Amino acid sequence: MDATLTPYEYTNLGPAEIRLLRPDTHNKSTAWILDTVSLESVALEFDALSYTWGSQLETYPIVCNGKSMRVHHNLYSALPFLAHRMGELTHRPIWVDAVCINQNDDDEKAVQIKLMGQLYRRAKRVWVWLGCAPAEVQSHISNAISLLPYIVEEATRRKASTYTSREEKVALPLRDLEPELWQAILHLLRNSWYSRVWIIQEVALASDIVFLCGADKIDAASLESAVENDRVSYWKISDINGNPVKPGHMGFDNSTVFHIRELAQGSRASLSLDSVSLLLRVTLLMTGEHACFLEQDRVYGMLGLIREEELASLAIDFHAYTSVPTLYTRFATYLLLNNDPNKTQFWWRVFNMAFSFHKLNGLPSWVPDFHHQGRMTKFVCVPARITMFGHNTAQYCASAQPTVVTAGSRVGELMIRGKFVDEIMITHAPCVRNLEKTGEEGEGARWIMTVAQWHETIAQKILEKYDHEDDGDEIETWRVSEKTYWKTLFADNFLDESNKPITMTMCRIFRGTMLHVAEACNWILESIRRKAAGIEEVPPEIGPRCSARVRMSSPYQPILAKLGRLGDRQLFNTKHGRFGFTIKGVQPGDILCVFNSASTPHVLRRMTDRDDGAYQVIGDAYVDGMMLVEVDAMGIKDQDILLV
């Protein structure tokens, strides 16, 4: 590019105006023209681009309107292919956010972001740029595309088979492929594009989608089917050299974007989803692992699903926010007041997103921090909600009575109808979370030993005689039945991870077994300590006797896995002898409540600095005897409960 070219300077846009990028057909090299057009023009035809920005550290020069403009690497690599996306050099313009919006003008960005929903609806076609793989892999992309139907075929075959194991090799033609070809397949199936927040509205609203990887086009339906059937991590695969192909497990469902598109388009009519109902579901689907740089984009990336005229009728300008907590509060208020909790349990799932360990300062207790909802982060329990502890054949339903939800008298207040049931008197130490593996020697043994010690402490208090005194007055023994104890620890789900039943006999054996297991783990950790200190001899006696007890096939494993699901949660006893658990941080004096129509009970905390009876909501809870509409029959009068 001519180094003497002057930098491109943006001019101001008028109302409903956008810029569109088109190749300069009079220039032999790839140069571009940026036009200003009205989005309200009936005759306007254009495409739009969906892509990841990627690293912003380096920029590269392009020619635009005869002047110099700099773009980041991923867009720079895409532009030559976009210029020829329809075969010959195309005349149809394309909208690309990084170029068509002046990124240095915050006022313009705010206006253009509001138009994005309308823009992607109007686009003739949305091109999804999956980037260029490394050269040795990119040359195999065409073959990888042709193999996508066989990914679906292999997944279907294994699902239909009653005997297919992980040790069985994949069928032809997926067997014995070049390693670079497998990398090309994974580039299509596991692309970082799937995890972007902004792609949701870009793809959900598009009338037509084509994927582009280098010069290769990919049919959207073919790629969608392959992504939805991606079980590659569970298959035994070897390349042509006999080396295993190990793509690793995904912590994210890449098919989410296609599911949301289906909700927003083809299936929306049959599901009778209005815009706000769609938004409720999308909030659940995309605020977990989808990536974005700015916290406000968690909301802006979804607002395009609602037409601008609908948003205008609400008299709520989400873009005129003074802080991210204000934006999140407005958005949560809109979602929860405009959806009916009596008609969909999705309402309660969004409500329960508010319970996490890290929240932005200034958020009401019932408003989720939409930016910190990742399943694998330190901010959220795993499972994230009590309902996830159950199994498909037995869903929780704490109340079947209809509820009423209204706004309080001040911003950030929510009023829900429900019942106060009990008061928490004793809280127990939280179960230690089984964090992601770091590779540290002995970390597994250390966690097992910690959980074993935690469980033994709880068991001694709950299953044996344990008197508690408060202000000098002896209160009844906090002992519960063996059945209630294990029902609570398992959240009444006695199926292991293989859907095999866990019996009470196994539970009784578990406690004694774990004493030996903890002893063996302690021996392992002591051996590691001695080795690190340069001591050759192993700890005496205990090694041969106990190390054999720590085996993956041991009967304690299914129950240990169950206890692992209690990580970062606290067990508690109540004033009236109930036993349950909720998110860590619960305190004696907190109130056990059941909101009408809720799937689970909730824990509330009185706001002592207010005289209007306001409460903070602490978390959802499992409480034996309160999970299946029992509270509805107790004769407790319901009332409006003010949450702040």
Image: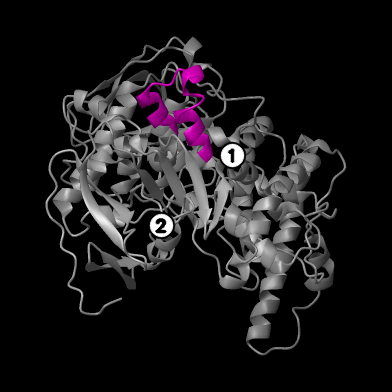
**Residue 609, image quadrant:** top left
Where is 29 relative to 467, above or below? below
- Mark 1 secondary-structure assignment: helix
Horizontally, is 625 left or right of 24 in the view?
Answer: right
- Decide whether residue 494 is among the magenta residues: no
Image quadrant occupied by the N terminus: bottom left
Indicate the amino acid at tag 2.
Ala
Callout 2: helix, strand or loop?
A: helix
Residue beneath disc 2: 83
Could you say where residue 245 lies in the image, as x and y percent from the top left? 73, 64
* Residue 606 in sight from this viewpoint: no
Residue 221: name its quadrant.
top right
Q: Which residues make up the magenta segment?
A: 258-281
Q: If you read the primary sequence from the N terminus, does the residue marked by circle 1 or circle 2 appear first?
A: 2
For marks 1 and 2, give the CA distance: 24 Å
| Mark 2 crowd level (few <14, some 14–19, many ≥20, 10 Å Cα) | many
Image: 270 above or below 359: above
Observer able to see residue 201? yes
Q: Main secondary structure of the magenta part?
A: helix
Q: Nearer the viewer, mark 1 or mark 2?
A: 2
- Three-letter amino acid code at the position of disc 1: Ala
Question: Residue 13 bears which disc, if any?
Answer: none
Q: Which residue is mark 1?
A: 221
